[in-house]
Image (cartoon, rainbow, N blue to C red):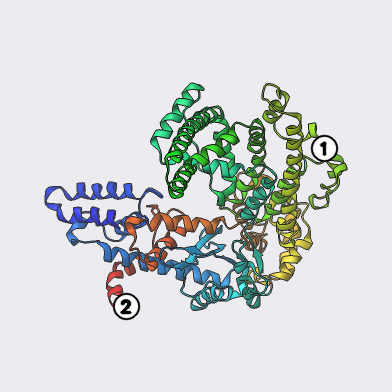
Amino acid sequence: MENSNRHLWYINNQHHHKHNKDRTEEFKDNTRQTSQKDKFPLEDGVIWHIFSTAYIDANDFTKKNMKFARNKATAVILDLARMNQNSLSERLKSAPFTVSTDGSNDATSKQYPLVVRTKHTGTGLVHSELLSIPVCSEAATGQNIFNLIDKDLSDRNVTWENCLSMGSDNASVMTGRHKGVYAYVKEKQPSVFLSGCVLHLIHISAKKAAEALPSIDDVLIDIYYYFDKSDSRKLLFKGSQDLCDLEQKRMLKHVCTRWLSIGRCIERLLLNWDALKDYFYKENEKKKDAKAKKDAKAVKGAKGAKNSDTSKTEKEKSKPSYAEKKVDSIFSFVKSPTNKLYCLFLSYTINVYDEVLKNLQAEDPRIHKLRASLHSVMRNILSRFVKPAAMVGNSVDEVMYKEQCNQKVDNDLVIGNTAKEFIRNKKKNHLRDSRIKEFFSAVRQYFVNACNYIKANLPLNEPVLLHAEVADTDKQSIVKQSSIEFFLERFPCLIPKGSSKDVILEQFVLYQSQDLASLVEDCKRIDEKWVIIGQLRNEGGSLMFQFLAEFMLGILCIPHSSAHCERVFSVVRKNRTDQRATLGDKTLEALLVIKSRPGHPCDLNRKHSNETLDRLKSSYYNHLNE
């Protein structure tokens, strides 16, 4: 709010120095600067948009002597958000939707943002929008969280009847079958689908797989924090980089909760491997010299000591410091050629997860691709250590990958060309045959661990994901009518008003017989394709697939991950900063509700109705009377 307040104060108090038109243009320029996405507080651009639309006169807006300070700006934001929430609530009463939530530990409260995914009436596309951010003042149990969600929906007269799915992370308090939030939602809507976050599961599978290897992530963390706060260490390390003729790049921070960040961190570790080995060798030698001097001094002091207390004090002083212990552990790691081999392997193999993670973090609907993506990542892992003969003709969950007879020999294991070249030059790299044998054994266990976790925890054979492929236009001619019947039976709310099961099935059969590839080939989003298909007309001018398109768009409302919910939390942190610590929960909720609407909130092309603008003009007055 500070930036918008400053600009508006400047305009209203310096009007006698400049021409009205010049001041208006300056206001626009200044405020547009503050509306750059994610760089400045959100309400600056929103206030400018409302102000320019509702208040600025074409001739001279300062004739009204309008002031737009903190209280009035807050009132406008709250009122606009309330209108957005009411509009969204009306849509949820008559259209299928999904609701997702996750706990956010804020400095002052426990927040549970309710992110709903439904079809937008204006564009016809599927979007995720923030409905509200209720605050839990009680213990965060499954029942209390459900009561919080249920009350929020009930207050808006939204029933659970149209809810297709509940999205959340994989915590037991959310997904528990007996006392989790999902259990209580299922009592209200028996056919609801639990949409857990496969992103988190894939992260965990990668971490579980790496348990077969040395603890590389711990070393990465130690190295980062060893240099993090010390300019002198960084300067000495740059000297080692210059000595090894390396580009001066700092070590990257590995975040354990986002384990797949290890890929980039290992790349930087390998780039600086020789420099790190040189630096920590010198530090280790310094430590040895210092220890030798300490020991000599301690011995000399012990001879002249008259009591045991003095001797005990000297022994305590001779203990290595925390930094010295880290130097020992890091140097022991980087001097080992076997550890470098493990890093080369992990740096190559971790990329197997990249494509599926990129797809699952997309904002557009991908539920029709989810099952294929999960099967693809497991098949990719299997192909790296399982013989092709054991995979051909079998689905990924049927492959007997644990059997030694089905696994490839050591030389055929897919470990990356750089790791293979390192092994070929084993004499030059001081690799022993026994270590190489241990390495291949660890690699096999890595792949087995990954497949074990994926097979046990990821929804490879979930019926909802299997039948959701019916919405994939690329599979137009091969999807089955049974998939349509599955959703008609499980989710009757998907049937559009004025339609019936027979009409949906009739339109589906007709859809499969049409050549629509050229019509939708330029569309990037699957929901865009169905919007176009829904607008097709026959020779008589009647819509051919109107109800089928609405039905498919309802299926696409089911989220493929919790990424859309996680984005809300990142925006919370960008708005409630140390400089805006007093930002209230209601104001924060209002800002994020506005931001979550389709399109950028500061887009000057976004239009508001005259009724909305008239109401916003009186927002502050209404706010005072509440």
Quadrant containing the C terminus in the rendered view: bottom left
Res. 284 visible in picture: yes
Residue at 39% over, 36% down? 231
Q: In this view, which residue lies farthest toward the front?
A: 306
Instruction: Identify the residue position indicated by label 1 in the image.
Output: 408
Disc 2 element: loop
The part of the image, by quadrant, that contains residue 51 is bottom left
Question: Could you tell me the amino acid type at mark 1?
Answer: Lys
Instruction: Identify the residue position indicated by label 2 in the image.
Output: 626
The part of the image, by quadrant, that contains residue 300 is top left
- Tell me, for residue 87, which label it has, or none: none
Up/down of 613 relative to 418, above or below: below
Quadrant containing the N terminus in the rendered view: bottom left
Up/down of 382 relative to 577, above or below: above
Residue at 65% over, 71% down? 493
Q: Earlier in the sequence, mark 2 or mark 1?
A: 1
Mark 2 or mark 1, which is nearer to you? 1
Question: Could you tell me the amino acid type at mark 2?
Answer: Glu
The part of the image, by quadrant, that contains residue 163 is bottom right
Residue at 77% over, 51% down? 477
| Nearer to me, 182 or 22 | 182
